[in-house]
Image: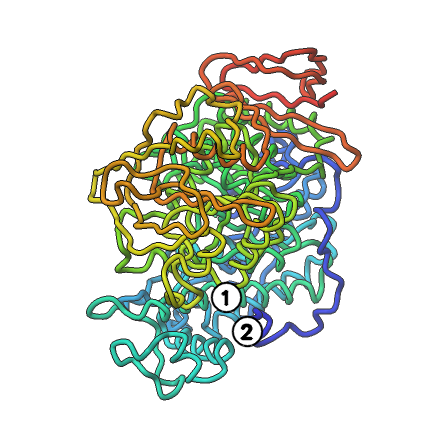
Amino acid sequence: MSVDALTPVAAEGAALTPARSGWIPGTSAIRFGGDYNPEQWPREIWLEDVALMKEAGINLVSVGIFSWALLEPREGEYDFAFLDDLLGLLHENGIDVDLGTPTAAPPAWFYRTYPDARPVTRDGLPLGFGSRGIMSPSSSDYRRAATAIADRLARRYADHPAVVLWHVHNEYGAPVTESYDDASVANFRRWLQTRYGSIAALNAAWGTTFWGQIYAGFDEIDAPRQSASVTNPAHRLDFARFSSDALLECFRLERDAIRAHATQPITTNFMASTCPSVDLWRWADEVDIVSNDHYLTAARLDAHVMLAMDADLTRSLAGGKPWILMEHSTSAVNWQPRNIAKKPGELARNTVAHLARGADAVLFFQFRASRFGAEKFHSAMLPHAGRDSRTWREITALGGLLGAAEELRDSRVRAEVAIVWSWESFWAQDLEWRPSVDLSHRERIEETYRTLWESGVTVDFVHPAADLRGYRAVFAPALYLIDEEGADNLRAFVENGGTLAVGSFSGIVDENDAVPAGPHPGRLRDTLGLVIEEFLPLREGHSAEVRWTASDAAAPVTEAPRRAAHEDSAPLSATVWADDIVLQGAHAEAIFTTGPASGGPAITRNALGAGSAWYISAAFDGADQSAIVDRVLADAGVTVTTPAEGLECVERIGDDGARWLIVLNHAEEPRELAAAGVDLATGERVTGSAVVPAGGVRILRVS
Ligand code: GAL
């Protein structure tokens, strides 16, 4: 189904050529800056701010994101004096502007006039004014008001020399994606009509003969509200799809309103791996440049690995093209249970990690710390402590480093390994009444990613139906739902010589959350060369022992260079899951020796066409997971060069073959690695080996 079918109104005159393939116009520098909210400050502070921005090398700020109440103090009455003044000042000082539409935070008058535009929760509570992101995406009043202010801004500032980029809304989907208000129900019915065409087709897709839920017409369908117990999962899944699409309709309306007047690129800030409710594969082509917000989860000691995962996912959404890190923090945020400050050097390490993984613009939330409001304890580029602070010194040093790294611009990151990422599958798997509460798609993907990160393997993320040519190995650690197109695509990848590694509880349902006829794993049966007779989930805290089979030594798998020390004879510890597997062509690489599937296959490999498909029927962690991943990589012919512990190395490659090695040292001691080239920050020529200071970064032009 095409999203096009859903957009009810195209803005009048959306005729200007979009800057689709373009990058932010203007300087060839790496873009550096942050959200700037000067509405919170008197004008004399603005003057200080621009001087400080220049001191730090800031060349781009995002403004206007929360300015609706100032720009339209009463409905239809506009006052652009503040923005005129601000854009003028920034431009005079050589600072470019990413101009936001303020539609994530409608003014108080809007809610007084249109109380029905508020979102309603699944259990029927309309949300109140006072936060942001509080609107029903289907409200025609909201859509009209948002499109009108976007249109006004575009008419006024399309030709303003400061404006180099448009920033629509803020973080669609956060904090609310699904709304159960009347407008959403009406819009959902339309969406279903477009998707299914007839009520009979919907009844068939949703399996409404179960529990006697047959609908006579679309007007009988409600949003899947809180009910006595579990409700129809296909209904829930379609409402999740619809809700993501309803937000996308909002984006498109604003984007088209801007495009009718302006030629600068238009973006909206994604939350790639951290907003689970928006299917960004459907959004990625709708923006001119992909941009992303990322905040560390401070409680996690591997937060830097999750940062890398988020950046790799963002680059993948951008189709490998340069992208913008629209927001990250200089130090602690204010919304986690314990807001841990970044250590000295961590700020630069985080920023450079995004740069390493393809960002050509790195911005923070926010330039100057707010004195009041909900975010006064959030870090900023200029903290409450002011200019004489570690944060400011690190910011100015970072500005210098990014200035020296300008030549990285427009170079690309290449990966020969990919991980399948499917929001649809995640939504479906997360519904109630699954065989085990311990199944977690997120946890499986993170564990697989972490293993690859530790091995120094750069990873792309792919949609199940993406073009997989060019990858040697594709991991699908959690792919509960797969449609025919995706399943055929994975099979073709294997037949054409690829190595696929599928995790447990994958291929279980089709796009309607229905089990395909026959045994599990449905559409992946032939590819994996096996069937599953029964799921055998483990009890909480239990594990089962798994051993590589003796014949494995003769299998066409060579030991990966890394972790050669892992003994084939050492048992692996499987948790969460096991299956009763019947092999139908696949070879058991490892078997369960204890637990409910004892004696049966645990890890299998199916030779198919020119490639192979592995199945991993349980959760494995740490060294065990690494041992499995290493075998898959070796089978795929992926060369692994494992960096020293704590080192993160990523390569960016230019069109002309120029290469840069970006190295981050997350360890508390200096680390050394083999390298030859020129350090962009110091100009030092490195021959043979480079030392990276504890917690430091180095960017080398490889010779
Ligand atoms: C982001 C949001 C910003 C700011 C930031 C604080 O999600 O876009 O406006 O609130 O969080 O971490």
Residue at the location (57% across, 35% down)?
A: 458
Locate the C terminus by quadrant: top right
Residue at the location (66% across, 54% down)?
A: 288
Whether residue 383 is visible: no
In the displayed orientation, state which residue is furthest to the right. 656
Q: Which mark is residue 245?
A: 1
Colour scheme of the picture: rainbow
Left or right, residue 263 beside residue 630: right
Image height of 630 relative to 471, above or below: above
Image height of 260 relative to 88, above or below: below
Left or right, residue 673 beside residue 195: right
Splitting the image into 4 quarters, where does residue 656 fall?
top right
What secondary structure is marked by label 2? helix
Q: Residues within 10 Å of mark 2 (few under 14, many from 20)?
A: some
Distance of mark 2 from mark 1, alpha carbons? Answer: 8 Å
The residue carrying mark 2 is 6
**Three-letter residue code for mark 2:** Leu
Whether residue 237 is visible: yes
What secondary structure is marked by label 1? helix
Q: Residues within 10 Å of mark 1 (few under 14, many from 20)?
A: many
* Dot placed on the residue nearer the N-terminal end, 2 or 1: 2
Residue 641: x and y in percent read 57, 24
Looking at the picture, tell me which residue is in the foreground, 73 or 266: 266
Locate the N terminus by quadrant: bottom right
- Kindly check if marks 2 and 1 are in contact, taking CB atoms under 8 A apart as contact: yes
Residue 44: x and y in percent read 57, 38
Looking at the picture, tell me which residue is in the foreground, 306 or 520: 520
Residue 591: x and y in percent read 34, 38
Residue 39: x and y in percent read 52, 48
